[in-house]
Amino acid sequence: MDKLIITGQRRLQGEVSISGAKNAAVAIIPAAIMANDVCIIDNLPCIEDVYCLYNTLTNIGAECEFLNNHTLKIDSRDLKTKKAVTEDVRKIRASYYLLGAMLGRFKEAEVALPGGCNFGNRPIDQHIKGFRALGADVEVDEEKGIVIAKANRLIGTSIYMDVVSVGATINVMLAAILAEGTTIIENAAKEPHVVDTANFLNLMGAKIKGAGTDVIRIVGVESLKGAEYTIIPDQIEAGTYMIASAITGGDVLVRNIIPKHMDCLTAKLVEMNVEVHEHDDSIRIIGGKKLYNTNIKTMSYPGFPTDLQPQIAALLSVCNGKSVITENVWDNRFQYVDQLNLMGAKISVDGREATVEGVDALKGTTVKATDLRAGAAMIVAALAAEGVTEINDVKYIDRGYEAVEEKLSALGAYIKRVKE
């Protein structure tokens, strides 16, 4: 396994360009197979989750070709199988989007249960509820680790999500596009990648209205056509570099972003006495002043994203005073806390709430990435820590961050990857 070695207390300076959004890419790639045609997807991040989906689509019969590092051509005209049960499918959470895509196109799907980061119970009951409401029979075979969905016809209906779920919103949207009649999804997720997926599908000929609000209306169409589409910038990668600049007292211009998507984070950084300058497609983060404590509550968009919660915890660890983080999305997302505490942080956890007592400085040591965003938090903490930090289980970080050591090195960090 690879590891990252970081020598801390280097002030980050310069510019960093943000890659395409992971959470949009992993939905749009499966969505592309719904057209009996060719799709070209631009601005893909070079990350492991994208490569897993590339392998999965190739294994089920799609002709996939990277035209360059960030552009993927997907030809689904000869796609005939309705099964996706390989190991690549089991590696990542987003493989469940193949259920909605194949059920919509073929009225039949057999997909391995999804994997991904393990930080709590993440059932797919809302996905199944939506598929069944559209008229599909859905069976979960726990022993074999697969989900089987079949339907003679999919009929539009009204579906109320019991909880706000990005995955279920997108998956039901996929299945409903080629259904007969109109489908209304209420209490829908409003995240930018939900909107991005809907925009891609509309370009293919779907009729989706209301994406970005809590009510999405889908009028079924008979077929979809191929399209070329450019994915939005990654909100979470952008936020990670913004926090990294703040914790090192840096001066970093984060380029190729949509500043509106960052409002929840920029507001908190300003509260913490970080200087923030917004431009049309970039944000400049200037640290160096005394950092103040603040409280964080994760929520669905436009609230503070759970995927930035571990990174902001690292920053709060070196702020003056006591901060409280309330996790409202996942039930066990504080597994990384023990790793930060190894570095000298003072964080205590009680259920979904973490109390962070600011310390003067973190200290380098050996830690591990317990999941994707926890790995990012270890990087953020290591950049500010005294001495050298060794981060193990980098495989999690590679799932969602493109060329992280190259980008940080360009900003002046002392970081290197050691291959074992």
Image: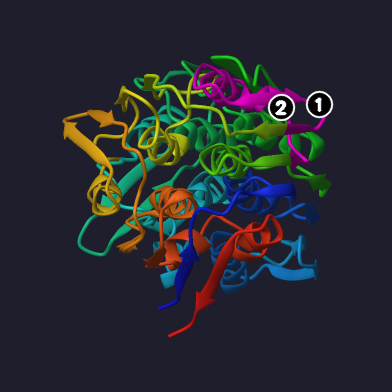
Which quadrant of the figure contains the C terminus? bottom left
Residue 345 shows in this picture? yes
Left/right of residue 353 with respect to residue 88 in the rendered view: left
- Give the residue type that dot 2 points to: Pro
Q: Provide the secondary structure element on which disc 1 rests.
A: loop
- Residue at the image point whose x is 40% and y is 21% from the top: 161
- Residue at the image point whose x is 58% and y is 34% from the top: 288
Query: Residue 86 lies in what quarter of the image?
Result: bottom left
* Residue density around tag 2, few if under 14, some if 14–19, many if 20 or more, within 10 Å: some
Left/right of residue 24 with respect to residue 277 in the rendered view: left
Name the front one of labels 1 and 2.
Answer: 1
Q: Position of residue 221 (x, y in %)?
A: 72, 32
Q: Position of residue 289 (x, y in %)?
A: 55, 28
Query: Residue 360 lies in what quarter of the image?
Result: top left
Left/right of residue 209 with respect to residue 264 in the rendered view: right
Give the numbered dot on residue 279.
1
Reading the image, the residue beneath label 2 is: 259
Q: Provide the secondary structure element on which disc 2 rests.
A: helix
Q: Nearer the viewer, residue 312 or 110?
A: 312
In the image, which residues are magenta?
254-283
